[in-house]
Image (cartoon, grey):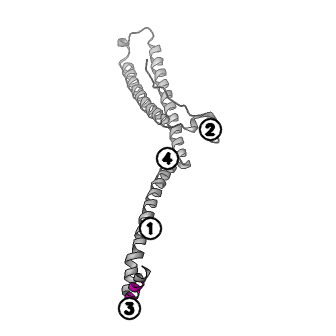
Amino acid sequence: MSNKWEKQYEASLEKSPTAFFFRILFRIILPIILVCGLVFGVIGHACNWFGEAATVAREEFGPRAMLKKYEWFKDAAAALDKKRADVGVYDARVLSLKEGYADTPRKDWAREDREQVNVWSSEKAGIVASYNGLAAEYNAAMAKFNWRFAEAGDLPKGADVPLPREFKPYISK
């Protein structure tokens, strides 16, 4: 068997070294390159898939992303506290005006005062609606993941009080 191959080898060399080179190239080297390329392509694709998963995890849970999310929760909690305080201010204004007209029916109030109470009531309703929308967004975002900064033992340096887990909707009486 090796005798046959040796004869072909010698015949190829006698024809020309170029023919021998191309025969070796197409029968041995090129198939090896194709197989290696296929194997490395499959491995590279798999690594890229895992690499993409690692990239997404880093983007969503890395320190920069966690800081941004913490800041959003902190800002949202402050905005909700402000809205609750604003509702209290409007309630105090209306109560103060009503105390001035203690035993007087509302139809007998001065027109400007009746209009002012209506304006304050509509502004309060807008703030309550805004509060409820932001509270729902806050609660949905907080429920998506177990945020460590809502736990007392896992607060960032300098933070004293954990963020609330949930804000209750503001319900007018």
User: Quadrant of the image for the N terminus?
Assistant: bottom left
- Assign the magenta stretch its main secondary structure: helix
Q: Nearer the viewer, residue 72 or 109?
A: 72
* Earlier sequence position, callout 1 versus callout 3: 3
**Circles 3 and 2 in contact, beta carbons < 8 Å:** no
Q: Secondary structure at mark 3?
A: helix
Q: Nearer the viewer, residue 128 or 153?
A: 153
Give the class, few, some or many, for how many residues have Cα within 10 Å of label 2's Cα (few <14, many ≥20). few
Tell me the residue that label 2 is attached to.
Answer: 154
- Find the distance from the CA under tag 2 to the CA under tag 1: 49 Å
Disc 2 versus disc 1: nearer the observer:
1
Tell me the residue that label 3 is attached to.
Answer: 14
Tell me the residue that label 1 is attached to.
Answer: 36
- What is the x, y in percent for residue 109? 38, 14
- What is the x, y in percent for residue 155? 62, 38
Tell me the residue that label 4 is attached to.
Answer: 60
Q: Amino acid at mark 2?
A: Asp
Above or below — where is 70 with respect to 100? Answer: below
Disc 4 versus disc 1: nearer the observer:
1
Q: Amino acid at mark 1?
A: Cys
